[in-house]
Image (tube, rainbow, N blue to C red):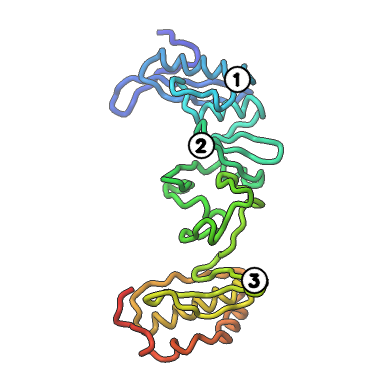
Amino acid sequence: MKHLSGVYPTARKNGQPSYRASITIQRKHISLGSYAKEEQARAAYLEAKTLLASPQIQPEDYNSSSMLSFEKWVILMNVRDNGVYFRTPLYLKKEYVLYYYSPSLCLTFDLKDLPFYSSHKLTKRGSSFFASEGGKQFPLLSHYGIRSYAREGRDYFFVNGDSHDLRYDNISIVNRYYGVQKEYRKGMPVYTARIQIRGSIIIGRYSSEEEAAIAYNKAASYLKEHGVAKTYPKNVLPELDEIDYARIYHLIQLPKRFSKPFAIDTSHHL
């Protein structure tokens, strides 16, 4: 039996027949999707041909009646205009790359991140984006060194105000470590280390983020050693070797209330 061009019969796992649509462009075989009816697969193939031949068609022209998924739409558009195939809905610009999550939502990334975004599919839950890898998902902002507990406007902010512009120059990280907050005193930056013990307790103020992060670690270790049940996440400082870390750790003096076990309410499970 002869089938329509661009359409290939196949079967689902339950034995039901299905039809796969695909198209070849620049010697690249691109799958367009699987459909229940042959006519649907043919319509997807013809739509892909029209898209590839029509440079005026843009992502915002996509509508829900399309037989192609929006992801395939963008992928084909990039092949059409830039001659490059990606498995994710990326569109190359001269100085940056766009990731079209939906017709009305587009993320902007640096070109140097192209290998990452061409191999990681993004999902969205609420206002947060996640990247998939090895069957697991992780917060997209962690790719930029932003911790899961961080809050926009306090720990980081977007220079141009656009939270969908994830180019490195547009992301300013103010507080990189647990328990550390950048503040200004007499116009000069200081880094305040705090820890929660039935309220926020100031450990100290330091001239560098690293010192404040280590002070937090030292306070967290002290609390654990003296029976406080709460688990305090530790800061990791890969930029410091073990000798420098140990030297700073030793020099840091905790406040007097940390000097005696009875000064801490260790019976309270925080």
Label 3 neighbourhood size at 10 Å, few (<14), some (14-19), many (20+)?
few
User: Residue 253 location, x and y as percent?
Assistant: 54, 87
Label 3: element kind? strand
C-alpha distance separating marks 3 and 1: 54 Å
C-alpha distance separating marks 3 and 2: 38 Å
Q: Is residue 135 left or right of residue 162?
A: left
Cβ atoms under marks 3 and 1 closer than 8 Å: no
**In terms of depth relative to the viewer, which is nearer, 265 or 30?**
265
C-alpha distance separating marks 1 and 2: 20 Å
Q: Which residue is mark 1?
A: 52
Q: Which residue is mark 2?
A: 101
Cβ atoms under marks 3 and 2 closer than 8 Å: no
Label 1: element kind? helix
Identity of the residue drawn at 62% across and 57% down = 172
Q: Residue furthest top?
A: 1
Mark 3 or mark 1: which comes first in sequence?
Answer: 1
User: Residue 243 location, x and y as percent?
Assistant: 61, 80
Q: Amino acid at mark 2?
A: Tyr
User: Is residue 240 depicted above or below 163 in this figure?
Assistant: below
User: Is residue 147 depicted above or below 139 in this figure?
Assistant: below
Mark 3 or mark 2: which comes first in sequence?
Answer: 2
